[in-house]
Amino acid sequence: YNTYASTYDALDAGQAASILGIEEARTNLFAKASGHVLEIGAGTGLNLYRYIPSQVKSLTLLDISEGMLQQAQQRLDQDPILQRQWKNVPIRWIQADATTELVSTFGPAMFD
């Protein structure tokens, strides 16, 4: 994933995702997130646009790829609208393998 992080959005979003209903499903799903949120496989941060930040107390973005997380951070850093929307929500960027024991990393009942 590090190798193609900078071009990953072309695979994961756009017209094909819209035609398949993925964009609409993402929007509906992430709009329901609230409280302390953990996004596993956060990738390039495409879903930052789909949350309702006023419902989120904290957001932890987890991905195995450092390159993907760098793209997500860059997305937030370069988009003034995202910066404004997320300015009051603590965001953590965690590089980790989601198949490992997450409870030992974060503790029980950490996320909503």
Image (tube, rainbow, N blue to C red):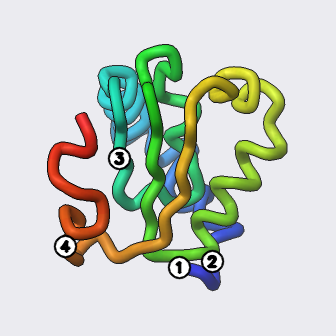
First along the sequence among labels 3 and 1: 1
State the residue position of label 3: 38
Instruction: Name the secondary structure under disc 1.
Output: loop
Judged left or right of residue 99, residue 20 is right
Q: What residue type is labelled 3?
A: Leu
Q: Give me the C-alpha separation between circle 4 and circle 3.
A: 14 Å
Q: Which amino acid does label 2 sit on?
A: Tyr
x then y, percent, for residue 102? 23, 65
Q: Give me the C-alpha separation between circle 1 and circle 4.
A: 21 Å
Q: How many labels does the image show?
A: 4
Q: Nearer the viewer, mark 4 or mark 2?
A: 4
Q: Give me the C-alpha separation between circle 1 and circle 2.
A: 6 Å
Query: Crowding near pointer 2: few (<14 within 10 Å), some, many (20+)?
Result: few
Tell me whether the residue at label 1 lies in contact with that at label 2, contact meaning CB atoms closer than 8 angstroms. Answer: yes
Judged left or right of residue 102, residue 25 is right
x then y, percent, for residue 76? 72, 43
State the residue position of label 2: 4
First along the sequence among labels 4 and 2: 2
| Viewer-closest of 97 and 103 | 103
x then y, percent, for residue 88? 63, 24
State the residue position of label 1: 1
Q: Which of marks 3 and 2 is in front?
A: 3
Q: What residue type is labelled 4?
A: Glu
Tell me whether the residue at label 3 lies in contact with that at label 2, contact meaning CB atoms closer than 8 angstroms. Answer: no
